[in-house]
Amino acid sequence: MTKVSIIVPAYNAASTLLQTLDSLLNQTYRDYEVVLVDDGSTDATRRLAEAYCANPRMRVVRQSNRGAAAARNTGIAAARGRYIGFCDADDMWHPQKLATHVEHLDANPDIGVSFSATTLVDEEDRPLGQFQRPKLHNISAAHLFKRNPVGTVSTVVARREALEEVSYRPYHENDRDWVFDEQLQAFDDFECWLRMALTTLWKIEGVNGLLTRQRVNITALRHGIDRQIAGWDQMIAALRPAAPAFFLQHEPAARAHQLHFLTRSRALDPEADRAGDMMHQALALSLRSDMHQDPAPDFHGEMARQMTREMAGNDAGETEQEDTPSSFASMVLGAISGGAIARTARSAPSSWI
């Protein structure tokens, strides 16, 4: 049995696919396969992927266009691995990533989801000056909901048994189980991890190192804010019946974090036009929640430092360190008055950190 299967959902991904596949097929750990699911692409995605099938680790599965969640479910059904990794068709893995996660899962049989930190890059693979430094251990369902330390799905290598425990088969589905909810328009991966944290005993833990590069598409970001907010509401509505008291207690803080995260992401776009509105919404929610510190300290870097300096009104040092607790309300008001939400900063291109 293959030890690991890496699932790659791809839809019209020809412009980024080669770099993604090269990173996946260049892993130092060798007992794995790559299962690319072509989600009804109309560009050269299928042709480019099939060209890689000369490598015995590579397989291509086709389906009609049903979305990324459906493509991941199709990939899981086709996978042979004991562990299941995920990488979107525009993201990249560090050569040591798979070896690190396999060691982590082998040594900790109670861990269902292993994740790593992330470096954000633009469409040309230039670092955006932001990287993730999330909490790695003792992650409760509440912390997961309010802070999402896992980040993008491309950080994850999961245990098959854990995915099977949260899987289900809708009455209209005849072919395979659903691990990811195909009816959600966004946050299907986050919903899965939160469902696991709420309903099973599997642990979700991270490993040290910036082992994933997440490509940020500014154009998609510019037009996807409303979809993200609607998707968040849809995700909450789907999970709330399973744990109503949990959501009653933690939803305001989680929503404030999500709005603040979208604001920071939107600030990467120099044409940002909704960041101020989202900051005001996040402020109002934070004042009703139990939050007493910056709700999104998991990303660090030049832009985070610049925003901190602008919001604090001083020249903070350049040394990377954990964000210190501060009043989110003061920070938001400072960002709105100082205009920091419209700025971005980039560092020069670099190799893996």
Image (spheres, rainbow, N blue to C red):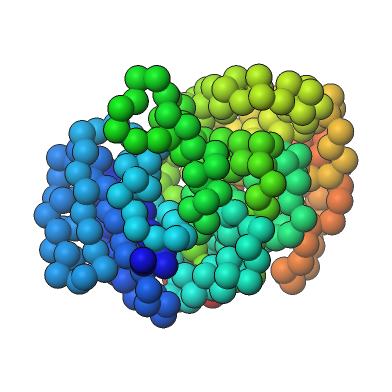
User: What residue is drawn where x is 42% and y is 44%?
Assistant: 218
- Horizontal side, residue 19 vs residue 47: left or right: right
Query: How far across and down, in percent of the image, does residue 137 sit?
Result: 74, 59
Quadrant including the C terminus: bottom right
> Going by the picture, which residue comes out furthest to the bottom?
28
Image coordinates for residue 117, horizontal then vertical, percent: 59, 62
Q: How many marks?
A: 0
Q: In the orientation shown, which residue stands out farthest toward the front?
A: 1
Q: Is residue 293 above or below residue 58?
A: above
Rendered image quadrant of residue 15: bottom left
- 11, above or below 130, in the image: above
Return the x and y of residue 11 as percentages of the image width and height: 26, 43
Position of residue 277 measured from the top left corner of the image (x, y, whole percent): 63, 26
**Of residues 213 and 179, the one drawn nearer to the viewer in this rendering:** 179
| Residue 251 against residue 6 in the figure, above or below | above
* Quadrant hosting residue 169: top left
Q: In front: 48, or 341?
A: 48
Name the residue at 22% across, 48% down.
Answer: 61
Who's the residue at 12% across and 54% down the image? Answer: 47
Task: Locate the N terminus by quadrant.
Answer: bottom left
Which residue shows up at 56% across the image and 27% down it? 235
Of 82 and 33, which appears nearest the observer?
Answer: 82
The answer to whether residue 7 shows anywhere in this view is yes
Q: Is residue 235 left or right of residue 91?
A: right
Residue 347 is at least partly visible in this image:
no
Q: Does residue 292 appear to the left or right of 353 in the view shown?
A: right
| Residue 323 against residue 250 in the figure, above or below | below
